[in-house]
Image (cartoon, rainbow, N blue to C red):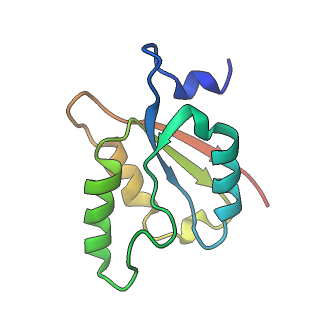
Amino acid sequence: MSWNYFFESKKDTRHKVFINYYHKEDEYYRNRFEELFGHLFINRSVKPGDIDTDVSTEYIKRLIQEDYISDISVLVVLVGSKTYCRKHVDWEISAALMKKVGGYSGLFMFTYTS
């Protein structure tokens, strides 16, 4: 089975994907993942600088759920040695797996070591 299987649909349309990763330490892996597979999906991820970090956690959570995750079909979680330090990882996974119109989002977890 090829990597394309996970990201290409039968109608030859690209899935909207949210990449969940620990921004402080795993930017390299997110960039590498996008270099290798970015042509296979539409990236709906939060990039550094997209969201003001001086606002409340609840506001950030709602913004990510409504503007980034609500219409994705696949959540990719890049799991590194410090992913557990990322305060948003659990509710981003939860938001992606909530039932929505048309079904659920898929979850793809990619583990690596530095």
97 or 13: which is nearer to us?
13
> Which residue is pictured at 42% across the width and 68% down the height?
50
Residue 71 relative to residue 92: left or right: left
- Is residue 111 visible in the rendered image? The answer is no
Quick one: which residue is furthest to the right in this view?
A: 114
Residue 55 relative to residue 38: left or right: left
45 or 95: which is nearer to us?
45
> Which residue is pictured at 32% across the width and 70% down the height?
60
User: Which quadrant would residue 26 be assigned to in this image?
Assistant: bottom right
The quadrant of the image that shows the N terminus is top right
Quick one: which residue is furthest to the front in this view?
A: 39
The quadrant of the image that shows the C terminus is bottom right
Quick one: which residue is furthest to the bottom in this view?
A: 54
> Which residue is pictured at 56% across the width and 27% down the height?
6
**Image mark count:** 0
Q: Could you tell me residue 94's position as x and y percent? A: 35, 51
Q: Could you tell me residue 31's position as x and y percent? A: 66, 55
> Is residue 4 placed above or below 85 in the rendered structure?
above
Q: Could you tell me residue 79's position as x and y percent? A: 62, 54
> Is residue 89 placed above or below 6 in the rendered structure?
below
Quick one: which residue is furthest to the top in this view?
A: 10
User: Which quadrant would residue 52 be assigned to in this image?
Assistant: bottom left
User: Which quadrant would residue 63 be assigned to in this image?
Assistant: bottom left
> Which residue is pictured at 47% across the width and 29% down the height?
14
Q: Could you tell me residue 37's position as x and y percent? A: 64, 38
Residue 19 relative to residue 73: left or right: right
- Is residue 100 visible in the rendered image? The answer is yes
> Is residue 100 placed above or below 56 in the rendered structure?
above
